[in-house]
Image: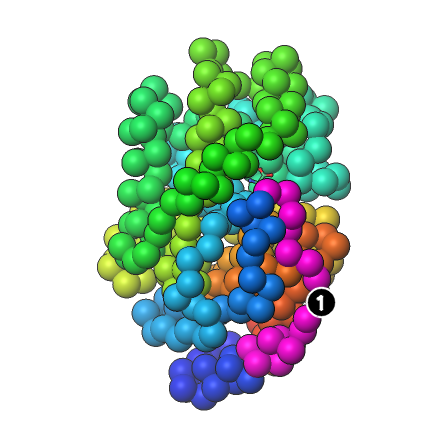
Amino acid sequence: FVLPDFQEFTGELAAIFERCRANTEGRVANCIPQLARADPTRWGAAVCTVDGQRAGFGDHQVPFCLQSVSKPLNYALAMTEAGSDRVHQFVGYEPSGISFNSIALNSENKPHNPMINSGAIAVCSLLARGQRLADRFDYVLRQYLRMSAGERLGFSNSTFLSERESSDRNYAIGYYMRENGCFPPDTDLRETLDFYLQLCALEATCDSAAVIAATLANGGVCPLTGDPVLSAEAVRDTLSLMHSCGLYDYSGQFAFKCGLPAKSGVSGAILLVIPGLMGIALWSPPLDRQGNSCRGIQFCRELVARFSLHNFDST
Ligand code: GLN
């Protein structure tokens, strides 16, 4: 696949984008009021290629919470910082086959993978370990900003506060993990859960998230700045897990139908990576039964069909 003409390509994307806008299926997440209030008509998309060409559609400049889209980024950071052996001492790399917020561990008593809550909480216990929580937060935000070439990121304190208030399930997961020795010694569980929820409450726009996706598509080097934020190995492993585990209980079907690494979040965000080519960010709050953005999934499927982008397409 080569992009013969970026203008022509974005013209086709615009047509797909408009077809998806007509999709009024799905329901906005209602787990917390901040998400339940989301406007179901919101629909944005942005593209950034590995050579820095950009395009944005619809609400591409409107901020949204990353939610679970933060999971692969945190994993990639931890892998870059601490290395694979250390990280995988605490988390597996196999699809779980059960819901993202299940209270369950694999046969080695580790979370199944870093794309579900338990695994993401384990990853958060490792990130910038040994520093104060405030410094760990600043550190992660700085790394995200390096991935986005300094473009628009934010933090929704109300989302963090209201999630923390209603996060019984994540607390239950955390206690169950601690009971099973899933954390490094001397892990402060409350702090780890706060950190996890704070990173879920980070905000991006489709524009800035597309640059982050393009950094993943580009082996960890931000295409706009040339900054090597993530190690190539960390990015490879992150993309592998996005491919097998990125879309909740739709992951296997998405891998089959689209054949690309992606990660979704309960805010209706999807980060889609076309390795070596481009990053795409999609955002629309109405979710399907598996918890993925209806418009976002339609966009991915139409894109792959139109441009033969499936990993195993041979033409
Ligand atoms: N903060 C949410 C949670 O922990 C993230 C879930 C998601 O986006 N799937 O439940």
| Position of 133 relative to 308 (above/below) | above
Q: Residue at x 32, y 56 (%)?
A: 152
The boundaries of the magenta stretch are 17-32
Q: In which quarter of the image is residue 211?
A: bottom left
Expressed as whole percent of the image width and height from the top left, the position of residue 29 reads 64, 51
Taking depth in this image into account, of 5 and 20 the one nearest to the observer is 20
Q: Is residue 240 visible?
A: no
Expressed as whole percent of the image width and height from the top left, the position of residue 302 reads 63, 75
Amino acid on which disc 1 is placed: Glu
| Position of 15 relative to 240 (above/below) | below
Q: How crowded is mark 1: few (under 14 residues within 10 Å), some or many (20 or more)?
A: few
Taking depth in this image into account, of 260 and 99 the one nearest to the observer is 99
| Position of 112 relative to 239 (above/below) | above
What secondary structure is marked by label 1?
Answer: loop
Q: In which quarter of the image is residue 77?
A: top left
Residue where numbered disc 1 is placed: 25
Q: Is residue 314 left or right of residue 215?
A: right
Taking depth in this image into account, of 121 and 267 the one nearest to the observer is 267
Expressed as whole percent of the image width and height from the top left, the position of residue 162 reads 52, 37
